[in-house]
Amino acid sequence: MDGVQFIDDIPAFQAGDIPDAVAFRFGDADLTYTALHSAADRLATTLRDAGVQPGDRVGVYVDKSLDSAIAIYGVMRAGAAYVPMDPGAPLARLTHIAEACGLRIIVSKERKAAGYEGVAKAVRMMDRVFTADGAVLWSSDRSTPVATPRARRPDDPAYVIFTSGSTGTPKGITHTHASALAYVRMSADLYGVTAEDRLSNHSALHFDMSTFDMFTGPYVGATTIIISEMHMKLPASLSALIEAEAMTIWYSVPHALIQLLERGGLDKRDLSALRWVIFGGEPMLPDALRAFAGHTPGAWFSNSYGPAEVNQCSFKHLSANALDGSPISIGRPCAHADLLIVDGDETAAEGELLVATPAMMTGYWNDPARNAAAFHTVKGKRYYRTGDLVRRDPDGELHFLGRMDRQVKLRGFRVELDEIELAISRHADVSEAAAVISGVPARISVYITARPDTAPTADDLRAFAAQSLPPQAVPSTITILPAFKRTATGKIDRKHLSEAS
Amino acid sequence: MTDPTTIDRKSRIRDFIVAKLLNGRAVGDDENLLLSGLIDSLGVFELIAFLEKSFGLTIPLDEVVLENFTSIDTIDAYVATKQA
């Protein structure tokens, strides 16, 4: 595999090496490496005939299924970058993405007609919508442009993922085949992934964590089990699937683990096949992880840290015995990553984390202003500014302190919203907590969800918070919600809370 | 002949789902409600709370599974067995 230069070479390589091994599985259906390779080649031919050429972008707008795998590999095989479009997103967002990166072609499915037809009407450049099998779902009246073929390069974009955009318009994080492969090779080594492994694909395509499942799994010849939308919403069915499929590597946002823990009926499940439980995207609650570990004999845990702009760049591996309820560090730099902590222009033990790695994005798609702000050159080397505050302890481990934009001054005091969330989530009845600042004068509002069969009161929770937080950080109000509204990637939608409070 | 309480039960379930969880979008009784763009995780919570309150049920977490919660038909059949 050392000779692989493009992500879409992976199925071709494995089809020669292990033709009948299962690359992807969804429900009861298997997609072998041979089938994936030939289906991707077929779709690539259809796309090329429709004028797609290296450097183009093609939308992928499908529910999680085997089509997800065929569509992304087929688009890349045609030399284009795939642009995942959240199948649950409103039309305005889909249209914005299509316009922002000049989509002419989308791969979709008939049941998503309302979405792709809406985009096709609104976006002038739109020309064709195909199924993953290459059937035409929608076509403009225009004639197909004649492509001028050019050779592919490893620094052609492989995918463009639009972030949910906590502020302003979505940003198109652009990764090349070279940056994607750098991440794939690092992650395959870091977790010792082999052809025997059975990976979960929990993250949808529009979430960067999916590249581990969709690329790293195939890179080593493993099987990736694509988890349906239905299973994602029903933790008791999800836990049954993990057992039935004997998944060995789990990778998700912390929220999915918490849902499994609270509603997955784990007492009745045998999850002993799991050898890695990897989580990332936001901080994991230490107590919840410890409780989860009680159901996964034989599993190691790993906190995977890294913004989508750079992919994973640090890790903290933990055995079940090491889970003592203290905050989980983001650990040490991955082998391929150069991490720098700066306070202003000086390097420091505490400050903003800067990252340089070969797995770094080339930039945000067609967004010079944001690109100018996103990178920082130190001694001739280009670093990505994470906007995350971290501290390096005397042992060299990194601790995530919070987002720089989540550190606020309130009546002259520095207040860390993440610290407030962690303090309140330690209450025995609290499942998850979210702290936001709003109003004039600014005040802290905290929202929580309660664990099943508990009924905490706001007064109890405030009193509890006051025991560990400085007075200025004690929230003015605490509201108990039945459940949080989530962003497209499964994180708590704090912007929504902030607007509502 | 269909028992009138049966019709009533299914239409109450359907009315709640369409009005409260799908913003008025019509769905078939056998349509998958958990695919993208339909009921989200938050909606599943609301649905369970509605069923417990409206039909006087206690729904254990390990029964909130695909077999019972995929469509209006399966939800109705599940509520029927709980009421029996």
Image (cartoon, coloured by chain):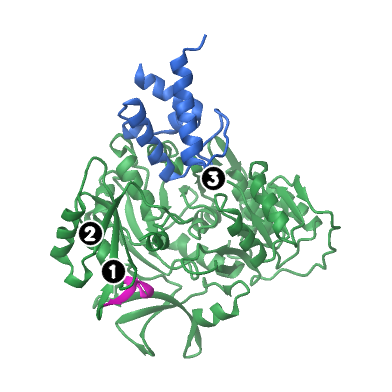
Chain colours: A green, B blue
Residue A60, compared with residue A54, is above or below; it is: above
Residue depicted at x 40% and y 24%: B79
* Type of amino acid at the residue the image marks with label 2: Ile
Residue that badge 1 annotates: A443
Give how far apart the Cα atoms at labels 2 and 1 are: 16 Å
Q: In which quarter of the image is the C terminus of chain B?
A: top left
Distance between the Cα atoms at labels 1 and 3? 36 Å
Q: In this view, does A377 lie above or below A144?
A: below
Front-lying residue, A1 or B42? B42
Which amino acid, by three-letter code, is at mark 3? Ser
Determine which of the numbered discs, if any, sits on residue B36 in the image.
Answer: 3
CA gap, disc 3 to disc 2? 32 Å
Instruction: Write down the region rendered in magenta.
Output: A400-410
Q: Is mark 3 on a helix, strand or loop?
A: loop
**Mark 3 residue crowding within 10 angstroms, few (<14) / some (14–19) / many (20+):** some
Say which of A298 and A483 sits in front: A483
Callout 1 amino acid: Arg
Q: In this view, does A293 lie above or below A306?
A: above
Disc 2: which residue:
A424
